[in-house]
């Protein structure tokens, strides 16, 4: 709606929240809104690269510190008080931004504090049911209760998935109690593209440190002696590691157009089964073997779900080898790819811009 001012703020845990915010920003611009980007770290940098003409503001960083082992939950639990402080600061800063920029609508991707009492506020979240490692499953009711209490400041939850059996995220996203709208998978890509296959094997690195770097080092050690045409998408602006093998191409952080071209040019890809990645592959298509981040039960759940559906296999990072990847890839059909018209997102945003909160199209 022309003249409406929309604040779009993705979480800074990895880049997935930022990449799936790209179609939200694009749709808001199509509906003649004035968009203000907000965030921190690499997440905000990615959006600024994608939309260099848009103004931006900074929010307090969550900046989680991850473990170099699989004991992720313990590491995050130790930072809980700091996260609480960040959420309070984030909320205070959001209220200031709303006043300074006359914001009409807030769209927060998993930033718990990015809402305002005086402005319509929407929370994007695919994991409305949080998964914990089996050793901590007894904490699940308390953790999910806290999760929902933090969502309580928002007027509505947008779930980037389909409802029911066609769901990509399965039990993670299926919800009947929250005021929620299913807006379909969010992807920066809208259809498959076709290129000559110039890479036999492409590694697309993502996710939090130190696991991203640990996985990168393991990959480099294995592909240095390979005869395959390999592309290593590092997802980082840090200086690339020296690789002797001339058949290996290294790239840093890339924009949407370049990553789409790399995906279309790859016979087989290896990557993390983050949900934003899976949503992208739903529309681009491609053959993939997933390597879940150690200690992340959500990724393990999604990898198992896709394997059960015959789409993509997965291997454990600890036992990862090129041979295991190639063998596993032969057993699964890959993502077919499909057009994405964004109709559900378009409708949801129109509702949010044009109607009062009490009139939004909420699934009962």
Image: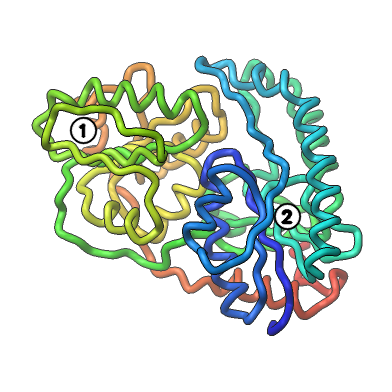
Which residue lies at the image location 69% right of the left edge and 59% below the top edge? 158
Q: Position of residue 300 (x, y in %)?
A: 49, 31
Residue at (68%, 36%) from the top-left corner? Answer: 62
Give the residue at mark 1: 326
Image position of 41 (left or right of 195): right
Q: Quadrant of the C terminus?
A: bottom right
Q: Position of residue 193 (x, y in %)?
A: 28, 65
Q: Does dot 2 land on a helix, a strand or a loop?
A: strand
Q: Is residue 14 left or right of residue 290?
A: right
Q: Quadrant of residue 87?
A: top right
The answer to whether residue 207 is above or below residue 59 is above
Residue 211 appearing in the image: yes
Judging by the rendered image, the residue that carries numbered circle 2 is: 123
Marked residue nearer the N-terminal end (2 or 1): 2
Q: In the rendered image of this protein, does residue 147 appear above or below residue 359? A: above
Height in image: 119 above or below 61? below
Q: Please give the name of the residue rendered at 84% of the width and 40% of the height, measured from the top-left corner.
A: 88
Quadrant that contains the N terminus: bottom right
Instruction: Give the camera-side residue of 117 and 241.
Output: 241
- Which numbered disc, 2 or 1, marks the residue closer to the eye? 2
How many numbered discs?
2
Q: Secondary structure at mark 1?
A: helix
Using a 10 Å C-alpha cutoff, classify the residue at mark 1 as few (fewer than 14 neighbours), some (14 to 19) or many (20 or more).
few
Q: CA distance from mark 2 to mark 1?
A: 39 Å
Disc 2 crowd rating (10 Å Cα; few below 14, some 14-19, many 20+) is many
Task: Say which of 317 and 222 sits in front.
Answer: 222
Q: Residue furthest right?
A: 117
Point out which mark residue 34 bears: none
Rendered image coloring scheme: rainbow
């Amino acid at each position: 709606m022309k003249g409406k001012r929309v604040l779009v703020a993705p979480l800074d845990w990895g880049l997935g929240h930022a990449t799936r915010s790209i179609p939200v920003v694009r749709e808001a611009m199509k509906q003649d809104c004035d968009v203000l980007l907000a965030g921190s770290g690499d997440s905000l940098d990615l959006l600024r690269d994608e939309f260099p003409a848009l103004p931006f503001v900074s929010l307090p960083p969550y900046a989680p510190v991850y473990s170099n082992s699989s004991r992720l939950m313990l590491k995050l639990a130790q930072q809980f008080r700091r996260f609480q402080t960040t959420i309070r600061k984030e909320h205070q800063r959001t209220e200031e931004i709303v006043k300074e920029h006359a914001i009409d609508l807030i769209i927060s991707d998993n930033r718990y504090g990015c809402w305002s009492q005086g402005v319509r506020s929407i929370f994007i979240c695919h994991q409305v049911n949080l998964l914990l490692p089996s050793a901590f499953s007894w904490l699940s009711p308390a953790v999910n209760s806290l999760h929902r209490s933090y969502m309580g400041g928002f007027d509505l939850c947008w779930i980037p998935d389909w409802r029911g059996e066609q769901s990509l995220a399965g039990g993670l996203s299926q919800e009947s109690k929250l005021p929620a709208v299913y807006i379909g998978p969010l992807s920066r890509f809208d259809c498959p593209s076709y290129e000559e296959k110039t890479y036999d094997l492409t590694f697309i690195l993502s996710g939090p440190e130190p696991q991203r770097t640990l996985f990168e080092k393991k990959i480099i050690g294995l592909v240095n002696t390979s005869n395959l045409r390999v592309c290593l998408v590092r997802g980082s602006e840090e200086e690339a590691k020296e690789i002797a093998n001339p058949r290996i191409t290294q790239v840093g952080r890339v924009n949407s157009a370049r990553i789409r071209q790399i995906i279309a040019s790859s016979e087989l890809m290896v990557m993390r089964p983050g949900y934003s990645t899976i949503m992208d592959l739903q529309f681009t298509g491609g053959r993939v073997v997933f390597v879940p981040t150690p200690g992340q039960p959500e990724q393990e759940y999604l990898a198992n779900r896709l394997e059960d559906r015959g789409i993509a296999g997965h291997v454990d990072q600890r036992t990862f080898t090129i041979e295991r990847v190639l063998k596993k890839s032969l057993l699964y059909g890959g993502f077919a790819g499909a057009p994405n018209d964004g109709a559900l997102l378009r409708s949801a945003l129109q509702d949010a811009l044009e109607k009062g909160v009490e009139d939004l199209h909420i699934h009962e």
